[in-house]
Amino acid sequence: MQKIIVTADDYGMCDIVDKAIDAGIENGVITTTNVMVNMQSLQNANNLRDRYPQISIGIHWNVTTGKPISKATEIPTLVSEMGEFYSVKEFKHRYSKGLINEDELKNELEAQYQLFEQICGK
């Protein structure tokens, strides 16, 4: 018998997405999920590993939606004047023009991973 891996992205985006992913896991359809640590419903992932020890849980790196984990003043090349990440299109444009500071990008990704470990464990 062949097995497949079904991944549900965007855990933590909002309550309705998290509930749908939970239902998919509980019904045996979803075998892995990725958590977006900078989104509004991150608290729903707080005991994810305890509730679903049978699935793989990873991080969904995100530098193009919502607000960063880092202070906006610490990563000014990644965020707009409103303190939110640039869109995918704008990020790609800025990156191709050398307008994204790679140290800032690295620092934000490290901050996301540290929060992921706090919420979901290693």
Image (cartoon, grey):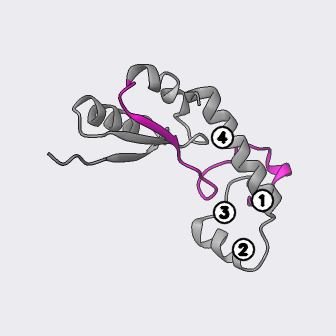
Q: Are marks 2 and 3 in contact (CB under 8 Å)?
A: yes
Task: List the residue tagged with mark 1.
Answer: 81
The chief SS type of the magenta part is loop
Image quadrant in which you'd find residue 65:
bottom right
Q: CA distance from mark 1 to mark 2?
A: 15 Å
Q: Quadrant of the N terminus?
A: top left
Looking at the rendered structure, the kind of residue marked 3 is Tyr
- Nearer to me, 72 or 30: 30
Which residue is found at the position 74% from the left and 60% from the top? 78
C-alpha span from label 3 to label 1 = 10 Å
Is residue 103 visible in the rendered image? The answer is: yes
Q: Disc 4 marks which residue?
A: 113
From the viewer's perspective, is residue 55 above or below residue 101? above
Q: Which numbered disc, 4 or 2, marks the residue that appears first in the sequence?
A: 2
- Residue at which label 3 appears: 86
Q: CA distance from mark 4 to mark 2?
A: 24 Å
Residue at numbered disc 2: 94
Residue at position x 28%, y 32% in the image: 23
Highlighted range, magenta? 52-78
47, 16: nearer the viewer: 47
Instruction: Name the quarter where the C terminus is drawn.
Output: top right
| Mark closer to the chain start, 1 or 2 | 1
Picture coordinates of residue 88 (x, y %)? 58, 67
- Circle 2: residue type: Arg
